[in-house]
Image (cartoon, rainbow, N blue to C red):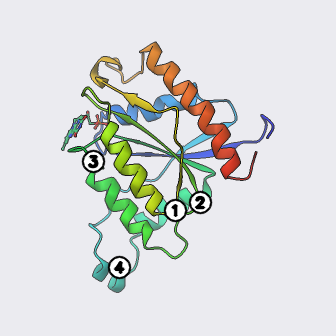
Amino acid sequence: MTSSDKLNVVTICGSLRRDSYNRALMRALPALAPAHLAFTEAPSYAGLPLYDSDLQKTAGFPPEATAWADAIRAADAVIVVTPEYNWSIPGPLKNAIDWVSRMTDQPFKGKPVAIQSASTGLLGGGRVQQHLRVCLTGVDAVVFGRPEVFVTFAAQKFDANGELKDEPTRDMIRQHLASFAAFAAKVAGKA
Ligand SMILES: Cc1cc2nc3c(=O)[nH]c(=O)nc-3n(C[C@H](O)[C@H](O)[C@H](O)COP(=O)(O)O)c2cc1C
């Protein structure tokens, strides 16, 4: 792969909260990534109804699920930046994955995916990452391993404007994105 080969990355935030630390982390990624990565945020999945196969049978896939799946399909790679809720995956994010998992042209199939997490606590989302790995492997994504990004004690790492100021955290993300870029290019057949 040459540095001029763009790698299109779609980002997904696991928090719906307006002042989310994970959203702030997601916004910090382009400045910390190799120049050939082009970032687009996936459309919102906030309006999705709770998955119900009866609803799917009677009404089909909601437009939000179709738009979300299309954005994932169109990308070379995916980065999910998510909080941990009660040691696991936030319900809205899991619900969105459940919706698209029922599509014939399942968007995560063969897709390189990286996970990052920010939490106000000590572990930085260590448990959600493990659970999300299992879930994404279950939809045939190719999940990136290491280096990992855990933003611990997030309230201390971002300033009042949601800017990521902590230099060791910025370095951790740079290393993660550089390694993921190489991994994703191989998986996407762009290496
Ligand atoms: C319902 C709920 C459950 C939570 N569970 C955890 C948890 O299991 N582990 C953790 O580290 N933080 C947990 N937290 C705290 C989150 O790390 C914190 O609220 C964080 O700011 C959420 O991410 P966000 O800022 O991107 O919305 C929980 C928060 C909520 C609202």
Question: What mark, if any, has residue 140 been given in the picture?
Answer: 1
Q: Are marks 3 and 2 in contact (CB under 8 Å)?
A: no
Q: Please tell me in which quadrant of the rendered image residue 95 appears.
A: bottom left
Which disc, if any, is residue 88? 3
**In the rendered image of this protein, does residue 124 appear above or below residue 41?**
above
Residue 70 point in image, percent of width and height = 54, 63
Instruction: Work out whether residue 93 or residue 188 is closer to the camera in this orientation and state it.
Output: 188
Picture residue at 30% right of the left edge, 79% below the top: 55
Give coordinates of residue 15: x percent, y percent. 32, 43
Name the amino acid, label 2: Gly
Q: Say which residue appears at 32% left-offset and 63% top-offset.
A: 48
4 or 3: tag closer to the N-terminus: 4
- Disc 3 residue crowd, few under 14, some 14–19, many 20+, Cα 10 Å: some
Measure the alpha-carbon separation of dots 3 and 2: 24 Å
Q: Position of residue 145 (x, y in %)?
A: 52, 41
Query: Residue shown at 30%/17% (left/top)?
Result: 156
Cα separation, mark 2 vs mark 4, equals 24 Å
CB contact under 8 Å: marks 3 and 1 = no
Ligand 1 within 8 Å of the CB at mark 4: no
**Secondary structure of the residue carrying numbered label 4:** helix
At numbered mark 3, what does the secondary structure look like: helix, strand or loop? loop
The residue that disc 4 covers is 56
What residue is at 39 percent from the left and 61 percent from the top?
97
